């Protein structure tokens, strides 16, 4: 599958909403072995908004943001966390062992990596004793937004162009992450939360998914007329699934969180 082309500006339209789960995740992360001078990796740093949150938590840490999108990293270097280092690398291939990290943090990235449970032993092995793996992933792949997208891309008009692999993303249930982290030698804390986010403006759910789940589809829709036609169809489905109320559109979003502390 062609790698998605990311749009930092579109992603950051909902920057506060996208970083709130990260802040909730970090609230459950204990002190790191080498604080204040800890080494922290932000795997899947995107445009740097997550890296800036990590700097708030660890002001004196050495932080490296890692992403496979040159567009996202350019935005991070230009407006993210200026005191961080940034590295262009694929999260599925990157080996953190050389960094000897105190913490590996990943904010809404693992869902894009098939077989990502297999990364956790590698990440745990790279940590210093007492180090932390902390990540959150979306748990909404059976939500109306995603079901409508899958239905539309399989429809007669779009299936030849988009195909079944146009949105290759997925996660496991919380118990699978608990088991994987425990097997990797970590004391694990795993939970889930559903955020009821109030979105405003025209077609706000469509604008939300344009920044994330819709990126693989938009990458394939290079013809402007085709893209407009697809967005019109998908937008109508989203308006029916998420009707606007008097104060905006309520968008429920389930998230899965995990924190693993490496045993000595």
Image (cartoon, helix red, strand yellow):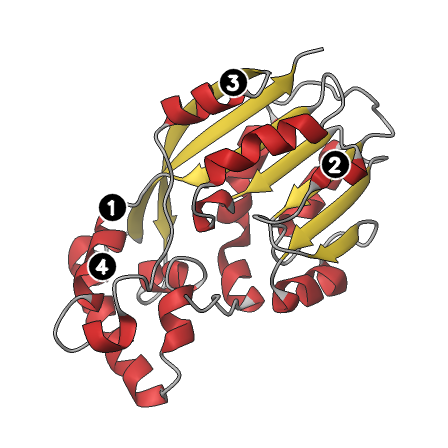
- Cα separation between marks 1 and 4: 11 Å
Front position among marks 3 and 4:
3
Q: Is residue 8 left or right of residue 205?
A: right
SS assignment at label 4: helix
* Numbered tag placed on residue 143 in the rendering: 1
Question: Which quarter of the picture shows residue 207?
Answer: bottom left
Can you say which quadrant of the picture contains the C terminus?
top right
Q: Kindly indicate whether the residue at mark 4 contacts the one at mark 1 (C-beta within 8 angstroms).
A: no
Secondary element under disc 1, as helix, strand or loop, is loop
Mark positioned earlier in the residue sequence (1 or 3): 1
Of tags 1 and 4, which is closer to the observer?
A: 4
Q: CA distance from mark 2 to mark 3?
A: 19 Å
Mark 2 nearby-residue class (10 Å; few <14, some 14–19, many ≥20):
some
Q: Which residue is mark 4?
A: 150
Mark 4 vs mark 2: in front? 2
* C-alpha span from label 1 to label 2: 37 Å
Sort mark 1 into few (<14), some (14-19) or many (20+) by Cα contacts within 10 Å.
few
Q: Which residue is mark 2?
A: 97
Task: Measure the C-alpha gap from mark 3 to mark 4.
Answer: 34 Å
Q: Which residue is mark 3?
A: 183
Q: Are marks 1 and 2 in contact (CB under 8 Å)?
A: no
Residue 107 on image: x %, y % = 55, 42
Report the front residue among 132 and 253: 132
Q: Image quadrant of residue 262?
A: top right
Q: Kindly tell me whether residue 73 is visible in this rendering.
A: yes
Residue at x 50%, y 70% (from the top left corner): 5
Residue at screen point 39% across, 25% down: 176
* Residue in the image at 24% along x and 61% along y: 149
Q: Secondary structure at mark 2?
A: helix
């Amino acid at each position: 599958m062609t790698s998605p082309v990311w749009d930092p500006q579109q992603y950051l339209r909902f920057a506060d909403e996208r970083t709130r789960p990260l802040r909730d995740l970090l609230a459950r992360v204990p002190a790191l072995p080498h604080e204040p001078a800890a080494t922290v990796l932000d795997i899947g740093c995107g445009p740097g908004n997550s890296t800036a949150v990590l700097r708030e938590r660890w002001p004196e840490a050495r932080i490296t943001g890692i992403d496979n999108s040159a567009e996202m990293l350019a935005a991070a270097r230009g407006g993210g966390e200026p005191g961080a280092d940034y590295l262009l690398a694929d999260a599925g291939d990157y080996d953190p062992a050389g960094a000897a990290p105190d913490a590996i943090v990943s904010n809404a990235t693992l869902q894009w990596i098939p077989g990502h449970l297999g990364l956790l032993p590698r990440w745990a092995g790279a940590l210093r004793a007492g180090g932390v793996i902390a990540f959150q992933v979306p748990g909404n792949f059976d939500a109306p937004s995603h079901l409508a997208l899958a239905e539309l891309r399989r429809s007669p008009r779009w299936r030849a162009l988009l195909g079944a692999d146009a949105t290759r993303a997925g996660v496991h249930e919380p118990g699978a992450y608990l088991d994987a982290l425990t097997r990797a030698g970590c004391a694990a804390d795993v939970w889930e939360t559903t955020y009821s986010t109030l979105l405003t403006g025209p077609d706000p759910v469509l604008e939300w998914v344009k920044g994330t789940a819709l990126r693989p589809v938009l990458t394939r829709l290079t013809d402007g007329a085709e893209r407009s036609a697809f967005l019109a169809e998908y937008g109508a489905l989203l308006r029916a699934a998420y009707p606007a109320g008097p104060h905006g559109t309520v968008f429920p979003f389930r998230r899965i969180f995990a924190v693993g502390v490496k045993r000595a």
